[in-house]
Amino acid sequence: MASPTEEPRSKEGPNDALARAREHGLAAAAEAVAAIHALLDAAALAASGEPSKLHPVLGPLARLLGDVEMRLENHEPGARVVDTISEALDVEIGRWEERAQDDPEARAVLRAFLGLRELLWEFGVRRRSSDPGAGRRGDRVQRVPVEG
């Protein structure tokens, strides 16, 4: 029996603590993305007087950050942060691949998104379903052909 000075033992189990940790982690990730988005806006406002979403080069990145932030804030049970970020990045890459076929300036934006995906890949941030080396060790670099 606990003495009057001791706190009673919590009935929380490890799964409850992990669920709490997940919630806090998702909230922290959403806040981090919001901070990056705000810094991007500050840079765009200082440079052009317009928010990043209206900037021709920064606009796609601003929309991607806004989408990721929204997905993190409204996460579905079982959703992985990595999947959310990877899916949003893949959507943007797909959009810019189409535009880059006819617009040479869009190729620079596409290269930036492909570079970001490569960087994330190097750090091990990738969806389980898109990880060709999930069952083996070895090369972690994904090669993507880029024209231009």
Image (cartoon, rainbow, N blue to C red):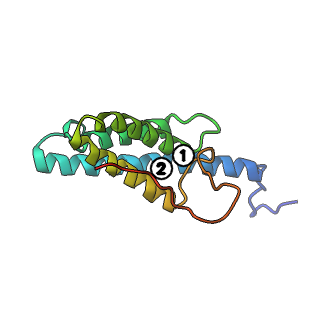
Residue at left 54%, top 46%? Answer: 81
Q: Residues within 10 Å of mark 2 (few under 14, many from 20)?
A: some
Assess whether mark 2 and mark 1 are in contact (beta carbons under 8 angstroms): yes
x, y percent for residue 148: 28, 50
Q: Which image quadrant for residue 103?
A: top left
**Disc on res. 37:** none
- What percent of the width, then of the height, locates residue 100? 29, 39
SS label for mark 2:
helix
The residue identified by callout 1 is 81
The mark lying in front, picked from 1 and 2, is 1
- Which image quadrant: the N terminus? bottom right
Query: Can you identify the residue that label 2 sits on?
Result: 29
Check disc 2 and give the amino acid type.
Answer: Ala
* Left or right placement of residue 69 versus residue 63 in this view: right
Between 144 and 48, the one lying in front of the other is 144
Please indicate whether residue 45 sits to the left or right of residue 111 in the image.
Answer: left
Residue farthest to the right, as pictured: 1
The spot of residue 120 in percent (x, y) is: 47, 56
Q: Nearer the viewer, residue 113 or 40?
A: 113
Image coordinates for residue 68, horizontal then vertical, percent: 43, 40
Q: Is residue 102 above or below residue 17?
A: above
Name which residue type carries label 1.
Val
Give whichever of 121, 49 is nearer the camera.
121
Q: Secondary structure at mark 1?
A: helix
Task: Classify mark 1: residues with Cα within 10 Å, few (<14), some (14-19) or many (20+).
Answer: many
Question: Which numbered disc, 1 or 2, marks the residue that appears first in the sequence?
Answer: 2
Residue at point 36% right, 38% down? 97
Q: Residue at x 26, y 39 (%)?
A: 59
What's the residue at 20%, 39% (across, down)? Answer: 56
Q: Quadrant of residue 133?
A: bottom right
